[in-house]
Image (tube, coloured by chain):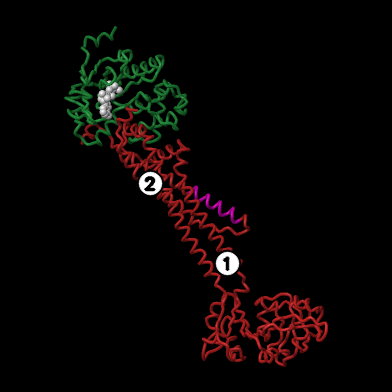
Amino acid sequence: MSAALLTLTGIAKSYHDGAPVHALLPTDLRVDEGDYVSVTGPSGAGKSTLLNVLGLLDLPTEGSYEVAGVETVRAAESLRVAIRGQWFGFVFQSFALLAGRTAVENVELGMLYRAIPARRRRALAMAALDRVRLAHRAHADPRTLSGGERQRVAIARAIAASPRVLFCDEPTGNLDSGNTDNILDLIGDLHADGQTVVVVTHDSKVARRGVRHVHVADGIVREAPAAQRHQRGR
Amino acid sequence: MGRAELGLDRPRLTVADLLREAWLSLAGHPARSLLTALGTVLGAAAFVATLGLSSTLAHQVADSFDVRRATEVTARGARADAPSWQEPSALARLGRLNGVRVCGARVILPERPVSRSLGEGATPLQTQVSGVDAGALAVISPRVVLGRAFDSYHDTDAQPVVMLPAAVARGLGVHRVGVAVFIEDRPYTVIGIFDDVARRPEALVSVLVPYAVAQPMAALSSGEVKRDVVIETEPGAAQLVGAQAALALAPEDPARVEVVVPPDPRTLRQEIEGSVARLALVLSLVALGIGTVSIGNAATAGIVARTAEIGLRRAVGARPRHIFSQLIAETTLLGTLGGFLGAVGGIVITVVVALANGWQPVVDVTTALSATAAGAGAGLLAGLLPAWRATRIQPVVAIAR
Ligand SMILES: Nc1ncnc2c1ncn2[C@@H]1O[C@H](COP(=O)(O)OP(=O)(O)O)[C@@H](O)[C@H]1O
Ligand SMILES: [Mg+2]
């Protein structure tokens, strides 16, 4: 059995602007090395909230969250910044690429705040673009790229420095079905090479690619039974 | 502690990366950057052009200042009394002063009739008559176009001779020397005609006679007689001579003598530069304020537009201090570039205006450098608040957008 990489214990999140919203009710969840977890559920269910807490983009209001055995909720912000920047990679629905910079410069940005020399960042960025089959567009302005190509640049940015976990929030939300398959194949390949992946989606077609299936509804997180998991074997 | 356990590096941003990021952000949005820096550009241009044009003008004033007039000092009686200060001994004391080249006495008589002939048909001209000794004549230096000037013989022997300004000679119909003209009813021989003077331009409308000839005329004159001592100094010695002339001419009572010196070209230049520099300072403080506010406003507005970008940077591992430094670097860089561009613009304005007027442009590098530095300061100051605000942006907004 592989080592626990991420461990949520009694994690909950509520918002308090106006009437309190319990976006996430107390949750236990464990993500292991090499997992491919897909998180599904209707809109407003709390999927993004769960991913933000897992990715250390946001703090929970209660509970404890350990990364490789190190508690993060009550730790210094600088520790969360370091884990987020060096262990995690993020892919967002909106691509979040910077205009006015080439594709490879956007990929490099993912490694900017780390002790990686500029030349090595360029080499890693080019390798990552090659991995997503976009080496030939390395110096293109993202505004001239198609949606699918932009998301591949974003994936290259997330994986360039080999993160321990790749978090994707609705990675295909802005793509047509052809590009969606393309991106899902790419994520599947990464997982096959050992990448730990957590994908949030409201699309069951996307969710089906996952190995583990977590369902969120009204802030309640439930993992689908193992039996369902094995269906994917086919 | 936790970082070491997980084998994580300390998040960091090198200065080279910081500057590169700031530059990419500015260069990636040229229109936004230009608009943000506009206030600083205009402010710096106004500063450099104002100072540049004022130095150019001051230089011009000092340059075109009449060098002859600047060596001219005049002493006259403060009261109507016996002119002991015009006597040869007084003039000799004055002549020994350092910086005095030549000096002499003058007596200026009120206008009186001067004519070519006496009797019927004569048309006298009402003309001022001045008695000048050899020294005063040397100071005035008339340009003789016909005949000759007086010499010491004419003066000491009180010879009845005159020198006529060309305009008076024409008016009287005198076209050669050796003929007589009448002042009141006494004849004088015309020995010279002059058309210009080096000093004392009022001599151009005055009939000149030897000092000794004018003395008895003054004694009989009914109108106001003016007396003075005219001095030509060494270049640059006018102020010094002016300060000592009264004492040299009237040692027993210097207050009897009033001395007129030309304005000091250096003082004049400093006065112009001083007043324009004060104006420029006020102008540039206002411009600097406008520049700071405009960068500050644009940067604050930019933070809202860049929320997603800042969230992304935080998501990929930027600490709040990295966000702060980058935004400060951006506004400072923008202020510096704006200041530099404005300084260049100001120099261009100075040179173009100067050349268009045929002046020698005076451009001060220090002014251009301080305009650039002021731009940098404005950028830094303007960035503080928006940069601090940007550090409040949470990484989660990278997903929310
Ligand atoms: N910043 C916030 N402030 C207040 N309520 C929020 C905020 N973010 C999310 N919520 C609420 O929390 C709930 C879960 O949101 P989210 O996790 O984004 O849902 P999902 O990603 O499943 O669509 C929703 O009801 C949403 O309105
Ligand atoms: Mg969501």
Q: Which chain comes out green in the rendered image? A: A
For label 1, the SS is helix
Q: Position of residue B307 (x, y in %)?
A: 35, 34
Q: Amino acid at mark 2?
A: Ala
Say whether residue B1 is left or right of residue B111. Answer: left
Residue B240 in sight: yes
Compared with B187, A70 (above or below) is above
Q: Amino acid at mark 1?
A: Ala
Q: Residue at x 50, y 54 (%)?
A: B48
Q: From the image, tell me which residue sits under label 2.
A: B382
Chain on which label 1 sits = B
Magenta stretch in the rendered image: B340-354
Q: From the image, tell me which residue sits under label 1.
A: B62
Say whether residue B146 is left or right of residue B361. Answer: right
Q: Nearer the viewer, residue B78 or B360?
A: B78
Q: Nearer the viewer, residue B154 or A88?
A: B154
Task: Based on the picture, tell me whether residue B342 belongs to the magenta stretch.
Answer: yes
Residue B363 lies in quadrant: bottom right
Q: Nearer the viewer, residue B221 or B65?
A: B221
